[in-house]
Image (cartoon, coloured by chain):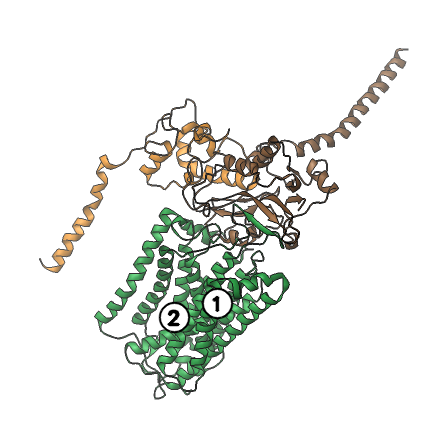
Amino acid sequence: MAQSCVYRELGGTSPRYWGLLALLAVPLALGAAAYFYIEHFGHIVTGMDNQIVWGMPHVFAVFLIVAATGALNVALAASVFGKTAYQPVAPLSALVSVALLVGGLALLMLDLARSDRMIVAMTHLNTKSLFALRVVLYNGFLATVAVYFWFMLERRMNRYIKSVAILAFLWQLVLVTGTGLMFGFMVARAVYDSVLYAPMFIAFSSAYGTAVFILILLAVCNWEERPIAGELLRRLKNLLAIFAGASLYFAALFHFSKYYLARSHEVGQFLLFDGGVYTALFWLGQVAIGGIVPLALLLRSRVSRRTVAAACALVVLGGVAQMYVTIIGGQAYPQILFPGMAESSSFFDGEIHPYTPSVPEVLLGLGGAALAAAIIAVALRALALLPERLDPTAGPQA
Amino acid sequence: MSADANEALSRRGFLAISAATLGGVMLAPGIRLIEIAGARAPEQAASKRVRWGLLIDTNKCAPGCDDCVKACATENGIRSTGHPRTDPQWIRKVELKDPRSGRAHSAPVMCQHCEHPPCVDVCPTGASFKRADGIVLVDRHTCIGCRYCIMACPYKARSIVFQEVTDQNPDVPRGKGCAEGCTLCVHRVDRDQQPACVEACAKAGHNAMIFGDLNDPQSEIARRVAKYASTQIRADLKLNPGVRYQGL
Amino acid sequence: MPPHGLLRFFACLLLALPALAFAAERTPKPFIVIDKPGQCVEAAEIMRREHPDMLKHQRDRTMREGIRTRKYSLKECVECHAGAKTASVIGEKGFCQSCHDYASVRLDCFGCHASKPKLASGAKP
């Protein structure tokens, strides 16, 4: 770390900061209330049914988890790939990664139909289950990032940063691959059933994570006038543009292959053209708002902080839309038991399953996001994680 | 004379004894075979020598007939709450129509009790498991209700219980928050009875369903599977289900 | 009052709280009435201490291996211990419920397991 960087905790007057926490407490409290409501009455009070078993909480949770792994990219760029320009913001990147992961994992645990058995979930692990393996991987990731954090903040441990960063990088790759394959290996569902989910989720995680990270960074710097170098901003926006472009590429490849191959043509057609809300969210949400418009904004040579922030917000919105299409759309399309035949039954075989998100589900999902934000707010106030100045006079050579 | 009589007796006796022993030795395997196919003592564990399966002749399945579905609901204490989208269903009749030829027929579909069940692979706690004799079950003591098994099942065999359950059949514990599916009436099978659906179908005279031990070459199901063509649903997935269909 | 005096006052109040535990009228006493004659599978002291382990051990043997011996089966417990009037082991004066309420230990079994014996629940025998 550059010696000339002075790190400082989040400043601002006490009432202002407590006001921020009070603001975050509202979705947190609503999320908690939603959780207890669902836990008491059972999932019957949600919009989920036996056709759509994973609803809005999963959309939010998977988004947060996927973004979490990608949010570490900026720190890894500094520690593994030697891009010293990112070094001053590396601790913040690690913090955002941990906070998003905790928020997402909490959501997953809280959405269990038997959430009173969380201890069972943590102590009984089926080694063949990708889901169970991810529990191990996530906790390991948290531990690795915690160690990475420590090495960054503790001057004496700075020389070991590279080794733990490489470990975190490899761990992150395995983790996102596992998350992608959790969907991709479900061969029974036509929307999944593709190994492409692994690299696609790596691209998504990089894009969403970087977008969230930049938003937090800009928010903190706005909170109390910490200047940012134009150079750092330029690098970050280019990084996000690369990841958003990669996401578009993999999405295009995925949908094209589904549409092109005869065995998956029907589901490809459903996703791209016939899927109603899913088609709309794909084209408008994932492609336009989440991909093309941000790219157009970011690929200009001179961009203001406001434009970058807007582009990041659009990428995040596009990401949530993509998760909705993947998770809900993947369940809306029925399992094909008898290929080539028209099926119908009292258990809704052969039809597109409808789904309406319910209020408790959305509140729970927002609560998870608020938890991540609260962790960031509290950690930034308690620890000195961001330099006072991120402009050339104090920062390292770009 | 007495010596001769003694010798003859002892020879006869010896022959008698050896004949009895030989007969016993030859019968003993037969007795053991009957043991496998017959009742298993309560203190005996399920054995992997057995593989329970169903053979369903859809040619005998009338569209609109749902005797098997009703029998399953009665046996397992599954009551309709008036909300079919959230009610569990362990077995259902799927009406099929070939859009090109117009041929229509129907088939009952339930948990296929695969040899390589995807639900068992994905369950994070190992609650979804395959018993030694091939029946795939949910251990509700460990189920956390994550619904991953429902996502992974190709046959839409599993449901999650959305509301509290009361008045369960003491033989079939089931409750809110746990995943569940056809158990092949394991509580009846262990008592040497048939699954409720099979029994109801036979009682009504349709005789479309046969239950038995696929590993026992003498059983009716094994003999039919060896003689007549039968298929598995989504055989391309190579899960080797224990439920086989004719006429699909 | 000076600050440390206030602190002392509240500390004394907190320390006095356990006295509330002696409000005996509000503690639900276990209602142990066994309507069916005969002995339990083990002595009462052993049952009180060991029944969770017995059930936990038996459940894995039954569930995973298919061993259905009747001695420690939960179904048999319910058959015997269900109250004569309510035909249930849970509910206000239920055998299992009242003791578990007294000990303040959550009863998870009857979310899934039938709390009434076979014929009472209306299921097919």
Give how far apart the Cα atoms at labels 1 and 2 are: 31 Å
| Residue C107 place in picture, x, y as percent | 38, 40
Determine the colour of chain A.
green
Q: Is residue A128 visible?
A: yes
Which label belongs to residue A95? 2
Q: Residues within 10 Å of mark 1 (few under 14, many from 20)?
A: many
Determine the colour of chain C.
orange
Which label belongs to residue B52? none
Q: Which of marks 1 and 2 is nearer the N terminus?
A: 2
**Which of the two residues, A134 or B242, is positioned nearer the viewer here?**
B242
Q: Look at the numbered discs 1 and 2 and tell me whether their residues touch, using CB distance below 8 Å.
A: no
Q: What residue type is labelled 2?
A: Leu
Determine the colour of chain B.
brown
Above or below for B29 versus A66? above
| Residue B135 place in picture, x, y as percent | 59, 42
**Which of the two residues, A4 or A102, is positioned nearer the viewer here?**
A102
| Residue C121 place in picture, x, y as percent | 44, 31
Residue hosting label 1 = A282
Q: What element carries label 2?
A: helix
In which quadrant of the rendered image does the N terminus of chain C lie? Answer: bottom left
